[in-house]
Image (cartoon, rainbow, N blue to C red):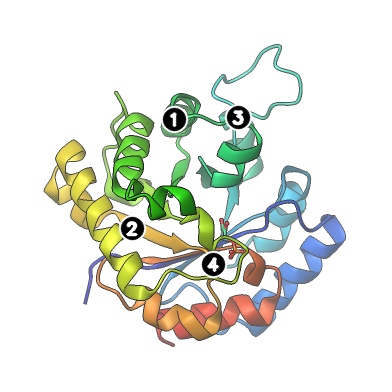
Amino acid sequence: MSERKPIVAGNWKMHNNTIETRTLIQQIIKNGKNLGQNCEVIIAPPFTSIACAAKEVKDSAIQLGAQNLFWEDKGAFTGEISGPMLKEIGCSHVIIGHSERRQYFGETDETVNKRIGSAIRNGLIPIFCLGETLAERETGQAFIVLKRQLVKGLESLKVENPVDFVMAYEPVWAIGTGKTASPEQAQEVHAFVRGELALLWGDKFAAKTRILYGGSVKAANSKNLIGQPDIDGGLIGGASLNAEDFLGIIEQGTGF
Ligand code: 13P
Protein backbone atom coordinates (compact mmCIF):
# COMPACT_ATOMS: atom_id res chain seq x y z
CA MET A 1 0.00 0.00 0.00
CA SER A 2 1.44 3.33 -1.05
CA GLU A 3 1.96 5.96 1.63
CA ARG A 4 0.67 8.51 -0.86
CA LYS A 5 -2.94 9.40 -0.12
CA PRO A 6 -4.79 9.49 -3.46
CA ILE A 7 -6.37 12.68 -4.74
CA VAL A 8 -9.49 12.98 -6.88
CA ALA A 9 -9.72 16.51 -8.27
CA GLY A 10 -12.50 17.96 -10.41
CA ASN A 11 -11.46 20.53 -13.00
CA TRP A 12 -14.76 22.19 -13.82
CA LYS A 13 -13.20 24.25 -16.65
CA MET A 14 -15.65 26.94 -17.90
CA HIS A 15 -18.73 25.32 -16.37
CA ASN A 16 -21.06 26.14 -13.48
CA ASN A 17 -22.33 29.57 -12.50
CA THR A 18 -22.93 30.22 -8.80
CA ILE A 19 -26.35 28.57 -8.73
CA GLU A 20 -25.07 25.43 -10.46
CA THR A 21 -22.02 25.44 -8.20
CA ARG A 22 -24.12 25.48 -5.05
CA THR A 23 -26.36 22.64 -6.28
CA LEU A 24 -23.48 20.41 -7.41
CA ILE A 25 -21.50 20.82 -4.18
CA GLN A 26 -24.60 20.12 -2.08
CA GLN A 27 -25.23 16.92 -4.06
CA ILE A 28 -21.62 15.78 -3.65
CA ILE A 29 -21.69 16.38 0.10
CA LYS A 30 -25.12 14.80 0.58
CA ASN A 31 -24.32 11.62 -1.33
CA GLY A 32 -20.61 11.31 -0.58
CA LYS A 33 -20.38 9.11 2.44
CA ASN A 34 -16.97 9.15 4.15
CA LEU A 35 -15.84 11.84 1.75
CA GLY A 36 -12.14 12.51 2.20
CA GLN A 37 -11.45 9.41 4.24
CA ASN A 38 -9.60 7.33 1.64
CA CYS A 39 -8.61 10.15 -0.67
CA GLU A 40 -8.35 13.91 -0.80
CA VAL A 41 -11.15 15.56 -2.75
CA ILE A 42 -10.58 18.84 -4.58
CA ILE A 43 -12.83 20.86 -6.88
CA ALA A 44 -11.66 23.70 -9.11
CA PRO A 45 -14.58 25.92 -10.18
CA PRO A 46 -14.22 28.92 -12.49
CA PHE A 47 -13.03 32.12 -10.73
CA THR A 48 -16.53 33.64 -10.50
CA SER A 49 -17.85 30.63 -8.58
CA ILE A 50 -15.00 30.23 -6.10
CA ALA A 51 -16.42 32.49 -3.38
CA CYS A 52 -19.74 30.69 -3.52
CA ALA A 53 -18.00 27.30 -3.51
CA ALA A 54 -15.92 28.33 -0.47
CA LYS A 55 -19.11 28.86 1.53
CA GLU A 56 -20.57 25.52 0.43
CA VAL A 57 -17.50 23.38 1.15
CA LYS A 58 -16.97 24.87 4.63
CA ASP A 59 -17.06 22.07 7.25
CA SER A 60 -16.76 19.40 4.52
CA ALA A 61 -13.70 17.46 3.35
CA ILE A 62 -13.75 19.14 -0.06
CA GLN A 63 -10.77 21.35 -0.79
CA LEU A 64 -10.84 24.21 -3.22
CA GLY A 65 -8.63 24.90 -6.20
CA ALA A 66 -8.43 27.51 -8.93
CA GLN A 67 -7.73 26.77 -12.58
CA ASN A 68 -4.93 29.29 -13.06
CA LEU A 69 -3.22 32.33 -11.51
CA PHE A 70 -1.03 35.21 -12.62
CA TRP A 71 2.51 35.30 -11.25
CA GLU A 72 2.58 38.88 -9.92
CA ASP A 73 0.87 39.44 -6.57
CA LYS A 74 -0.84 42.69 -7.64
CA GLY A 75 -0.58 45.51 -10.13
CA ALA A 76 -1.80 46.82 -13.46
CA PHE A 77 -2.59 43.47 -15.08
CA THR A 78 -6.13 43.81 -16.41
CA GLY A 79 -8.12 40.62 -16.25
CA GLU A 80 -5.69 38.65 -14.11
CA ILE A 81 -6.07 36.99 -10.71
CA SER A 82 -3.17 36.59 -8.26
CA GLY A 83 -2.03 33.99 -5.76
CA PRO A 84 -2.82 36.12 -2.67
CA MET A 85 -6.35 36.69 -4.02
CA LEU A 86 -6.91 32.94 -4.39
CA LYS A 87 -5.47 32.27 -0.98
CA GLU A 88 -7.69 34.89 0.65
CA ILE A 89 -10.84 33.49 -0.93
CA GLY A 90 -10.14 29.99 0.40
CA CYS A 91 -8.20 28.12 -2.29
CA SER A 92 -5.58 25.61 -1.18
CA HIS A 93 -4.66 24.41 -4.68
CA VAL A 94 -4.20 25.83 -8.16
CA ILE A 95 -4.05 23.99 -11.49
CA ILE A 96 -1.13 25.21 -13.58
CA GLY A 97 -0.06 24.43 -17.13
CA HIS A 98 -3.22 22.67 -18.25
CA SER A 99 -2.98 21.70 -21.91
CA GLU A 100 -5.99 23.86 -22.79
CA ARG A 101 -4.07 26.87 -21.51
CA ARG A 102 -0.97 25.78 -23.43
CA GLN A 103 -3.04 25.17 -26.59
CA TYR A 104 -5.45 28.12 -26.63
CA PHE A 105 -3.92 30.82 -24.42
CA GLY A 106 -0.25 30.85 -25.30
CA GLU A 107 0.97 29.22 -22.10
CA THR A 108 4.64 28.22 -22.37
CA ASP A 109 7.04 26.29 -20.17
CA GLU A 110 8.40 29.67 -19.05
CA THR A 111 5.03 31.12 -18.00
CA VAL A 112 4.13 27.83 -16.33
CA ASN A 113 7.37 28.10 -14.36
CA LYS A 114 6.51 31.64 -13.19
CA ARG A 115 3.02 30.58 -12.15
CA ILE A 116 4.29 27.59 -10.18
CA GLY A 117 6.79 29.89 -8.47
CA SER A 118 3.99 32.23 -7.47
CA ALA A 119 1.85 29.37 -6.14
CA ILE A 120 4.72 28.11 -3.97
CA ARG A 121 5.53 31.61 -2.71
CA ASN A 122 1.90 32.18 -1.78
CA GLY A 123 1.34 28.88 0.02
CA LEU A 124 -0.87 27.37 -2.67
CA ILE A 125 -0.36 23.77 -3.77
CA PRO A 126 0.30 23.67 -7.50
CA ILE A 127 -1.28 20.90 -9.56
CA PHE A 128 1.32 20.99 -12.30
CA CYS A 129 -0.04 19.52 -15.55
CA LEU A 130 1.95 18.06 -18.38
CA GLY A 131 1.16 15.87 -21.34
CA GLU A 132 2.01 15.14 -24.95
CA THR A 133 -0.13 15.63 -28.06
CA LEU A 134 -1.13 12.77 -30.34
CA ALA A 135 1.37 13.90 -32.98
CA GLU A 136 4.15 13.95 -30.40
CA ARG A 137 3.25 10.44 -29.24
CA GLU A 138 3.01 9.09 -32.77
CA THR A 139 6.39 10.50 -33.73
CA GLY A 140 8.13 9.08 -30.67
CA GLN A 141 8.52 12.48 -29.01
CA ALA A 142 6.33 11.92 -25.94
CA PHE A 143 9.06 11.34 -23.38
CA ILE A 144 11.23 14.16 -24.73
CA VAL A 145 8.31 16.59 -24.49
CA LEU A 146 7.32 15.42 -21.01
CA LYS A 147 10.88 15.79 -19.74
CA ARG A 148 11.15 19.28 -21.23
CA GLN A 149 7.84 20.36 -19.67
CA LEU A 150 8.89 19.02 -16.28
CA VAL A 151 12.43 20.38 -16.22
CA LYS A 152 11.53 23.84 -17.57
CA GLY A 153 8.35 24.08 -15.53
CA LEU A 154 10.28 23.50 -12.31
CA GLU A 155 13.49 25.35 -13.20
CA SER A 156 15.03 27.15 -10.19
CA LEU A 157 12.11 26.14 -7.97
CA LYS A 158 11.96 23.95 -4.90
CA VAL A 159 9.14 22.74 -2.68
CA GLU A 160 10.07 21.70 0.85
CA ASN A 161 7.34 19.20 1.60
CA PRO A 162 6.07 16.70 -0.99
CA VAL A 163 2.49 16.97 0.30
CA ASP A 164 2.56 20.57 -0.95
CA PHE A 165 3.13 19.62 -4.57
CA VAL A 166 0.98 17.64 -7.01
CA MET A 167 1.55 16.69 -10.62
CA ALA A 168 -0.93 15.59 -13.27
CA TYR A 169 -0.21 13.68 -16.45
CA GLU A 170 -2.87 14.47 -19.03
CA PRO A 171 -2.20 13.14 -22.53
CA VAL A 172 -3.74 15.81 -24.76
CA TRP A 173 -5.22 13.15 -27.04
CA ALA A 174 -7.23 11.73 -24.12
CA ILE A 175 -8.81 14.97 -22.88
CA GLY A 176 -12.50 15.20 -23.61
CA THR A 177 -12.18 12.66 -26.41
CA GLY A 178 -13.44 9.55 -24.67
CA LYS A 179 -10.05 7.95 -25.46
CA THR A 180 -8.20 7.01 -22.30
CA ALA A 181 -4.59 5.98 -22.06
CA SER A 182 -4.50 2.32 -21.13
CA PRO A 183 -3.51 1.74 -17.50
CA GLU A 184 -0.18 0.35 -18.75
CA GLN A 185 0.46 3.36 -21.02
CA ALA A 186 -0.35 5.75 -18.19
CA GLN A 187 1.72 3.80 -15.66
CA GLU A 188 4.73 3.90 -17.98
CA VAL A 189 4.53 7.70 -18.16
CA HIS A 190 3.89 8.13 -14.45
CA ALA A 191 6.93 6.03 -13.58
CA PHE A 192 8.97 8.11 -16.03
CA VAL A 193 7.72 11.39 -14.55
CA ARG A 194 8.48 10.21 -11.02
CA GLY A 195 11.99 9.23 -12.15
CA GLU A 196 12.59 12.64 -13.72
CA LEU A 197 11.28 14.38 -10.60
CA ALA A 198 13.67 12.25 -8.53
CA LEU A 199 16.61 13.47 -10.64
CA LEU A 200 15.54 17.04 -9.93
CA TRP A 201 14.33 17.02 -6.33
CA GLY A 202 15.60 13.69 -4.97
CA ASP A 203 14.29 10.16 -4.58
CA LYS A 204 12.59 10.76 -1.25
CA PHE A 205 10.64 13.74 -2.51
CA ALA A 206 9.58 11.97 -5.71
CA ALA A 207 8.51 8.84 -3.83
CA LYS A 208 6.07 10.94 -1.80
CA THR A 209 4.69 13.10 -4.63
CA ARG A 210 1.16 12.47 -5.82
CA ILE A 211 0.97 12.19 -9.63
CA LEU A 212 -2.60 12.24 -10.97
CA TYR A 213 -3.84 10.93 -14.30
CA GLY A 214 -6.29 12.97 -16.37
CA GLY A 215 -8.09 12.33 -19.65
CA SER A 216 -11.57 10.80 -20.00
CA VAL A 217 -11.54 9.25 -16.53
CA LYS A 218 -14.90 7.71 -15.62
CA ALA A 219 -16.07 5.53 -12.73
CA ALA A 220 -15.77 2.49 -15.01
CA ASN A 221 -12.08 2.96 -15.83
CA SER A 222 -10.92 4.68 -12.64
CA LYS A 223 -10.18 1.52 -10.69
CA ASN A 224 -7.70 0.16 -13.21
CA LEU A 225 -6.04 3.52 -13.72
CA ILE A 226 -5.75 4.58 -10.09
CA GLY A 227 -4.82 0.99 -9.23
CA GLN A 228 -1.48 1.39 -11.02
CA PRO A 229 1.51 1.70 -8.71
CA ASP A 230 2.53 5.22 -9.80
CA ILE A 231 -0.94 6.67 -10.40
CA ASP A 232 -2.09 8.48 -7.28
CA GLY A 233 -5.52 9.68 -8.32
CA GLY A 234 -7.31 11.52 -11.07
CA LEU A 235 -7.80 15.00 -12.49
CA ILE A 236 -11.33 14.81 -13.81
CA GLY A 237 -12.97 17.08 -16.40
CA GLY A 238 -16.36 16.09 -17.80
CA ALA A 239 -17.21 13.50 -15.18
CA SER A 240 -16.65 15.99 -12.35
CA LEU A 241 -19.68 18.02 -13.47
CA ASN A 242 -22.13 15.41 -12.24
CA ALA A 243 -22.22 14.38 -8.56
CA GLU A 244 -22.98 10.73 -9.25
CA ASP A 245 -20.18 10.38 -11.81
CA PHE A 246 -17.67 12.22 -9.63
CA LEU A 247 -18.55 10.19 -6.54
CA GLY A 248 -18.42 7.02 -8.65
CA ILE A 249 -14.81 7.78 -9.51
CA ILE A 250 -13.97 8.41 -5.86
CA GLU A 251 -15.63 5.14 -4.84
CA GLN A 252 -14.31 2.95 -7.63
CA GLY A 253 -10.93 4.58 -7.86
CA THR A 254 -10.01 4.79 -4.23
CA GLY A 255 -11.77 1.77 -2.92
CA PHE A 256 -14.68 2.45 -0.66
P1 13P B 1 -11.92 15.06 -19.34
O1 13P B 1 -12.03 14.23 -18.08
O2 13P B 1 -13.18 15.75 -19.71
O3 13P B 1 -11.30 14.28 -20.45
O4 13P B 1 -10.89 16.24 -19.00
C1 13P B 1 -9.70 15.95 -18.39
C2 13P B 1 -9.05 17.22 -17.98
O5 13P B 1 -8.64 18.01 -18.81
C3 13P B 1 -8.94 17.52 -16.55
O6 13P B 1 -8.10 18.61 -16.31
- Specify the quarter for ligand 1: bottom right
Disc 2 versus disc 4: distance between alpha carbons?
18 Å
* Nearest to N terminus: mark 3 or mark 2: 3
Contact check, label 2 and label 4, Cβ < 8 Å: no
Q: Is residue 231 visible?
A: no
Q: Amino acid at mark 3?
A: Gly
The residue beneath circle 1 is: 109
Q: Residue at x 42, y 28 (%)?
A: 113
Could you say where residue 228 lies in the image, as x and y percent from the top left?
A: 29, 74
Q: How packed is label 1: few (under 14 Cα within 10 Å), some, or many (20 or more)?
A: some
The residue beneath circle 2 is: 210
* Nearest to N terminus: mark 3 or mark 4: 4
Q: Amino acid at mark 1?
A: Asp
Q: Amino acid at mark 4?
A: Ala
Indicate which disc residue 70 carries: none
Tag nearer the camera, 3 or 2: 3
Tag nearer the camera, 1 or 2: 1
Q: Residue at x 46, y 56 (%)?
A: 171
Q: Quadrant of residue 11?
A: bottom right
Indicate which disc residue 61 carries: 4
Disc 1 versus disc 2: distance between alpha carbons?
21 Å
